[in-house]
Amino acid sequence: MGKYNDKENDDYLIKHNLLEINSHKELERAEALAFTLRAMALEQNDFIFESFTLKKFQELHHYLFQDIYPFAGDFRDVQLMKGATRFCQVRFLNSYASNLFMELNEEPLWNSLNEAADRLAYFKAELNMLHPFREGNGRTIRIFLHAYAISRGIEWSYETLESEKYLHAMIQSVTDLKSLREVFLETIQYIG
Ligand SMILES: Nc1ncnc2c1ncn2[C@@H]1O[C@H](COP(=O)(O)OP(=O)(O)OP(=O)(O)O)[C@@H](O)[C@H]1O
């Protein structure tokens, strides 16, 4: 079990994709298409969030990536890094995840958009540090937290995120939630 860099991961995905695609470019295109079709179907209620448990989170990843990756829905068994960030160690994934999802389900109601932004930033950063899947963490977490926010009367317009600002806030969130909180504050509103 080694840590992987992006090249190593790309090679793994080439060896482990359901379509037996062996070009990186083609796999990238096929993955984007397979994901987009599922994400669109999800918006038409093909996947229902009747709960926000860890099981539901894994089912969501399975739903979104089932057409392309055999590991859809499964936790990774390798160490993951992006840039200087080392995500949760494999042997702590289960305990980290169960504590985090317990907290998410015991979360009290939010009394203001400021409080919502604080807590969404916190859960976003924690789920990112968990980074439980080999690929597709960002997309799964965004869709999951979007639905979670809706269940609390809040619309998170994550499709309006500026990609550079978002990435910067995510990198910062490893040590400081301030930028990510601001990103949420700018992209959430009460429904209706
Ligand atoms: N250096 C970093 N430190 C911490 N988090 C990072 C870093 N670089 C990227 N991220 C986070 O990791 C996520 C990407 O994870 P992953 O590649 O598993 O997901 P994805 O769904 O395939 O990608 P994306 O989120 O770009 O659509 C990004 O959305 C971002 O939140």
Image: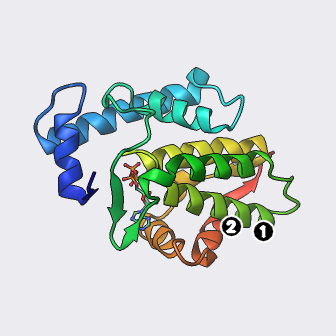
Q: What residue type is labelled 2?
A: Leu
Q: Which colour assignment does the render follow?
A: rainbow
Determine the CA span between mark 2 and mark 1. Answer: 7 Å
Local secondary structure at mark 1: helix
Which image quarter: residue 151?
Answer: top right
Q: Residue at x 46, y 46 (%)?
A: 139
Q: Find disc 1 in the rendering and name its residue.
A: 114
Which disc number belongs to residue 49?
none
Q: Considering only vertical position in the picture, is 46 above or below 81?
A: above
Point 46% across, 51% down: residue: 91
Q: Which residue is drawn at 29% across and 36% down?
A: 31
Q: Is 145 displayed left or right of 191 in the figure?
A: left
**Upstream in the sequence, badge 2 or badge 1?**
1
* Displayed-image quarter of ligand 1: bottom left
In the image, the residue with mark 2 has its CB under 8 Å from the nearest atom of ligand 1? no
Q: In the rendered structure, are the residues bearing label 2 and label 1 in contact, judged by CB atoms less than 8 Å apart? A: yes
The residue depicted at 16 percent of the width and 46 percent of the height is 11
Which residue is the site of mark 2? 185
Q: Residue 167, how many percent across, how many down?
A: 44, 67
Q: Classify mark 2: helix, strand or loop.
A: helix
Image-based side of 16 in relation to 190, left or right: left
Question: Compared to 166, does 6 lie above or below?
Answer: above
Q: Can you see residue 49?
A: yes
Residue 71: horizontal and vertical position, in percent? Answer: 35, 33
Nearer to the camera, 89 or 60: 89
Quadrant of the drawing holding the C terminus: top right
Q: How crowded is mark 2: few (under 14 residues within 10 Å), some or many (20 or more)?
A: some
Residue 95 lies, in percent from the top left, at: 59, 49
Residue type pointed to by label 1: Asn
